[in-house]
Image (cartoon, rainbow, N blue to C red):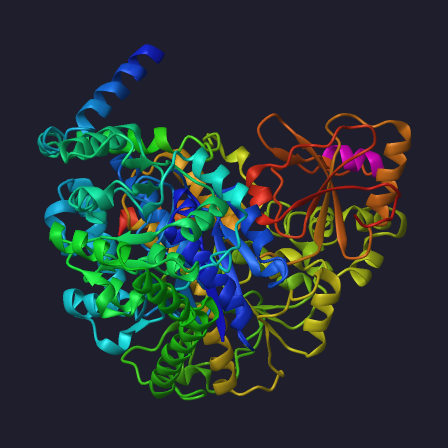
Amino acid sequence: MRLAKMLALRVAAFIMARPGLDLFLRRQLFRFPALAGRMRGAIARSRHSDSPSLPPPLADEAELSEPARQVLHELRRALDRSSTS
Amino acid sequence: MRITLDLQACQASSMQRGIGRYSLALALGMARQRAGHDLRIVLNEFYADSVATIRQGFDALLPQSHISTFAAPMPTSEVDRRNHWRLHAAERIREHALASLRPDVVHVGSLFEGLSENVVTSVPRSENRFDTAVTLYDLIPLIRSERYMGDPNFAAWYHRKLEHLKASPLLLAISNSARLEAIEFLGLAPERVINISSAVDAIFRPLALGQDERAALLARLGLRRPFVMYTGGIDFRKNIEGLIEAFADLAPALRGQYQLAVVCNVHEADRRRLTRHAAKCGMAEDDLVLTGFVSDADLVALYNCTALFVFPSLHEGFGLPVLEAMACGAPVIGSNSSSIPEVIGRADALFDPTRVNSISASMAQVLLDPARQAALRTHGLAQAKCFSWDASARRAIEAFEETHARRTAAGRVAVAPGMAPNIARRPRLAWVATQSSLPPDLAHYYDIELVLLQDGPDVNQALGRRSIAWFGDNADTFDRIVYRFGNSAAHAPMFSLLERHPGVVVLDDFFLGNAVSHAKTADSLAHDFGRALYLAHGYGALAEEQQQGRARSCQTYPCNKAVLDRAMGVIASSPDMPTLADAWYGPACSADWRVLAPDADAAQFYDALEHLAGAGQDRRTLLASLAMLGPNVPQPDLLQTAAAIAANRPRTGRRQLLVDVGAGLDAGAMDALRALLLMPPAGWRVEPVRHDGVRYRYARRFALDLIGRTDLALDDAVADAGFGDALVAAGVAPAPALPDAWRARGVTQSVVTEPGEAP
């Protein structure tokens, strides 16, 4: 994994040191927005390794505080109303 | 006027960039210059570390309670399409959290955030109750779209943010150039865009560097000759390639006396590219020095040491390095484009950045002429004094005042107090009470349905009278719901109605214990008497009830906290009630209440009700707008959203002393904790908590055992904490870890040494 990452960084450095090639490859990538978005996201995440990690996902109502449970019930009612109207 | 600053610009990665530094310095200036205005700061709870740093920065300027955080479902970065629902939900939740702080103006330090991070920014619709001002740094991606809009993800994000920017009634431009660009490229009215300019930190000043100190610095950075300096980004518009070409274009004899120092963080790929470019231009290996990142102290020293500072940028919003260099007494020349001329303030120090020979000629003029160098140094120092953060902050606050005055004037014309609004449809009002005790003539203002909880003579024959069952089925169709609460058994059904269909509460009685004791135990709001007593008054009240009986407790304790928390607003029928609420539940508990005498007329009632319901209505509107975002929301997102909305509600009530009992207590600690539960320190509510491996939960069963109320059943629900609360280790337990969200909200860690002593 470390070797693959090192290789990827070297390839990226090689490309970025050649603005013409860099621009050409970017244009090809931008033809696929979803792929470009994933790549941008991955690069951003690797650069912001010091940013906080996401909290563990909530799976159950019991993991909510009492005020949050009240809001959840209201939110569900609002969603039900929205789907039936 | 209440001014709220959204300082997310000082969180995430922007914190390290010019935008973060600008936003922080301006906010500090506003805090110093706020005069009589009420200044608040709002931050993103997700970035807990930065919250702590920012709190520290404002320590001497603002009360810590004026710095709050908002929570939102995460992640929200726009670049990942899987975040779409959460992103839009988070924007609405943030707007709702801001509205709950009752600001007159919200200032967003940086709107263009959140592409690849969890920063949430937006400008609410114009009918919102506060104005949003946004700092405008530049429109470079729009103006040079051929260069910046290649990535469709970036382009979509940028254009969406531009729409928000255009919706803002006030833009605070960081230069006149940026202001003019906004007027030209966004078509905005000139009065909506104000130039507040920029400034530099006081650390940028002339220094008397010792010979050794100077030599050590230069040697460390590889500078062996006098040097020409540039600092800033590496982006193409900074035109570093043009600067290298211009340096290479200097006469060899002159060039040989100097090195070109590019002072900034440089990625390896950029380093290779610039080095290759310099070699291609015929420069020797040591002619170009790429220092990499330097500290602020080194940067100031370098400004003080340089023979010439050159800023060849093609386009800037302001050009902060230019002002930093001038403030340090460096001779400065720069581009004649965008904002740079207004910063430099001297025509003969400008060049055309698109022409290499123009840059090199300008450089040579200064390097060859010591008198010109001296003149530029003198001019720079004088020019730098024209910029200050306090002046920028004053201009920003004046602009807020003008914008707020315009809104207030417009509002006065729209609705005069006490006047029935001239609208096509009167709002529908459900009046839930035990008797038909309506203010006379209220029907002029509302289309009213009476929901009476007990039979009796009907004094309002003209109004419709509905059953509780009918109300339950139709509650969502009402614009306003009013519950007239009193302390009798007849009021008992009201608890469950208020729970399911929130509305404004009119308090005829402050003490509700008698009504609570008659409510069904299935009603989650009233619960049973013991639970209501605990929620409102804590474990000490439960112990007292056991000894003295329920009747006495009903007389002693109001038992109405759950009702007050659930209400969308409170109308008190006597001026004593707000005082009682603040005394029982903590200061400011009744801050937003209205007091109306029982004989208040319909106009007074209408004004009070619209004010309170308008504020409380926000949550209904928020939930409805979230529901509109789309069906089939994944369960984890729903849970996270509910948790965030609940966490963002302004806190009322006493501060919590959360005692971590997870590690077990020895006998002495048990005794101390029991004493604390029975007699909490003044102004505090004591709650034992226990970490379940993921989050803290209230250790209610443990606490009931400790005070001897094993006859009651309370669940160990997830604990909630906010600003002012404290988490302490009990007895021999090691200091517990503070959850990030709690740390961001301003929960502290303390140690209690003696029973009854506040931390």
Magenta stretch, main secondary structure, is helix
Pinpoint residue B128: horizontal percent, then vertical percent: 36, 68
From the viewer's perspective, is B725 left or right of B278? right
Residue B123 location in percent, x, y? 32, 60
The number of discs equals 0
Q: Nearer the viewer, residue B613 or B378?
A: B378
Is residue B248 at least partly visible in the picture? yes
Q: Nearer the viewer, residue B337 or B331?
A: B331
User: Relative to the observer, which residue lies in front, B270 or B328?
Assistant: B328
Corner quadrant of residue B463: bottom left
Furthest-front residue in view?
B253
Position of residue B694 measured from the top left corner of the image (x, y, whole percent): 57, 28
Relative height, residue B511 to residue B48 (above, below): below
Instruction: Give the magenta range.
Output: B701-707
**Is residue B521 positioned above or below B101 on the image?**
above
Q: Residue at x 72, y 72 (%)?
A: B579
User: Is B383 drawn above or below residue B296 in the view shown?
Assistant: below
Based on the picture, tell me whether residue B592 belongs to the magenta stretch.
Answer: no
Quarter of the image holding residue B695?
top right
Q: Position of residue A64 (x, y in %)?
A: 53, 38
Q: Residue at x 48, y 58 (%)?
A: B206
Residue found at x 70% / y 53%: B655
Q: Nearer the viewer, residue B18 or B238?
A: B238
The answer to whether residue B481 of the structure is visible from this angle is no
Q: Is residue A62 left or right of residue B699?
A: left
